[in-house]
Image: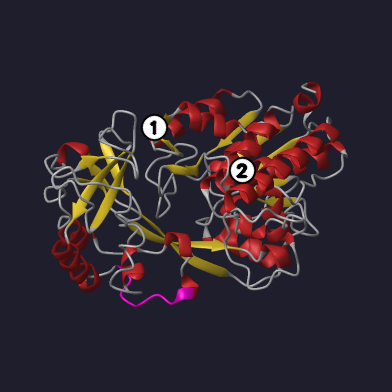
Amino acid sequence: MEDQVSVVGGGLAGCECALQLARRGIRVRLFEQRPAHESPAHHTGSFAELVCSNSLKSTKPDTAAGLLKNELDMMGSVLLGCARRTSVPAGGALAVDREAFSAEVTRLIESELLIEVARERVREIPVGQSVIAAGPLCSDELFEAIANAVGGTRMSFYDAAAPIVDADSLDRSVVFEQSRYEQGGGGDYLNCPMSREEYDAFMDALLSADRVIARDFEQRDLFCACQPLEEVARTGHDSLRYGALKPVGLTDPRTGRRPWAAVQLRAENPARTAFNLVGFQTNLTWPEQRRVFRMIPGLESAEFLRYGVMHRNSFVDAPHALDRTFKIPGTRARLAGQITGTEGYVEAIASGLLAALNTYAEVRGLPAVQLPPTGALGSLVAYATDPATTGYQPMHVNFGIVPPLQDPPRNKAEKRAALVARAAEDLTRYLEQRPDLFPAAAGDR
């Protein structure tokens, strides 16, 4: 019988996985429940829809996010290439026109002869080789089936998305263009400057506003990188001034001085016709979002193209439920994406690539992938599959989980550079040793 793999979920991880398998000659049946069955966060039936920010984080080589992108380039990621082809200006970050990005991935999926798309809801783990990349919002039936298979208890955290506003509704006499520390105008971001009085009034309104979920969230319910703005505000009156609304590196052209606080807006598309409010993930009701966010200078008449939303994200206790290839023991099914607790857009792409490589290796009788733990992805996999990990929570790539250097430089920049250099060297060596999985890497040397 011809080799075939079922991939459940048409998000970032599922699409990367399906395309990687197909390009290695493996026939794929890709299941996606949308648009017949909508989720609380999605708005379209397209593949690889971004439901929160349109930013894929930093491209700077001395950051963990930048290092991960470099590793994915070395390993031949398909979706990272899509992101670059549909990028919009975002300073040192990789941000995309979300509609163009999704359209590009959809085009690749639908034009791939070895991928069969099945628009239907999956309620049980498929028979045979499969990769479940249904995301943190998979159907209750499928999640229960996964929970039963791994023998673990169900866990969840809350995630939030920021609102998007129409560029034509902004007051350009107040809003100014500038990236932090950039001299003059013309920056990739728009900024809404606040005086001390405006900030104080905004904070009072934000803290008293009605929320969709009325109770105060306990810290354990919230993934720290996606906490609602109002929950961050509850930690202290100046918490936002030192966080999402920090004015450092900005100069209000009306005064020639740094504002007391500043709300930054990031473009959603190359035409800059829509902007999202950076860091404004929220649980406020839609009427309250209109009322409170229009208190921001320059947004008094803002037209909201999409309101912020909050939804439940679920994940499994990967270190104690899965093997080192994210496979459910005793089955032929692997998990990929945010349901494993590897949190973030690029991390989801990376886990889809890794799932494809390990599934391909199993189908062909090859050794499993063992990425060096010194890299961004290798260290994240090591963290997410280490049985010694306790209190497992969703994790972005970061240098905190990378093994320390021997005799590290004291200078922080030099230390980061050394970590990046070691990671690149170790991954290059590993790829050269695996021409069965990475023929291009071996052929380039």
Q: Based on the displayed image, in which of its 4 quarters is residue 239 positioned?
A: bottom left
Q: Based on the displayed image, in which of its 4 quarters is residue 438 positioned?
A: top right
Q: How many marks?
A: 2
Mark 2, other Cα within 10 Å: few <14 / some 14–19 / many ≥20: many
Q: Which residues are magenta?
A: 212-219
Vertical placement of 293 versus 317: above or below? above
Label 1 sits on a secondary structure element that is strand
Query: Can residue 47 be seen by looking at this rendering?
Result: yes
Q: Residue furthest front?
A: 410
* Nearer to us in this view, 150 or 294: 294
Percent coordinates x, y for residue 141 in the rendering: 56, 61
* Nearer to us in this view, 412 or 374: 412
Vertical placement of 303 versus 85: above or below? below
Q: Amino acid at mark 2?
A: Leu
* Nearer to us in this view, 290 or 418: 418
Mark 1, other Cα within 10 Å: few <14 / some 14–19 / many ≥20: many
Which residue is denoted by mark 2 in the rendering? 68
Colouring used for the render: secondary structure
Q: Residue 215: within the magenta?
A: yes
In the rendering, which numbered label is found on residue 88?
1
Vertical placement of 62 versus 342: above or below? above
Vertical placement of 124 versus 349: above or below? below
Residue shown at the point (75%, 63%) measured from the top left? 386
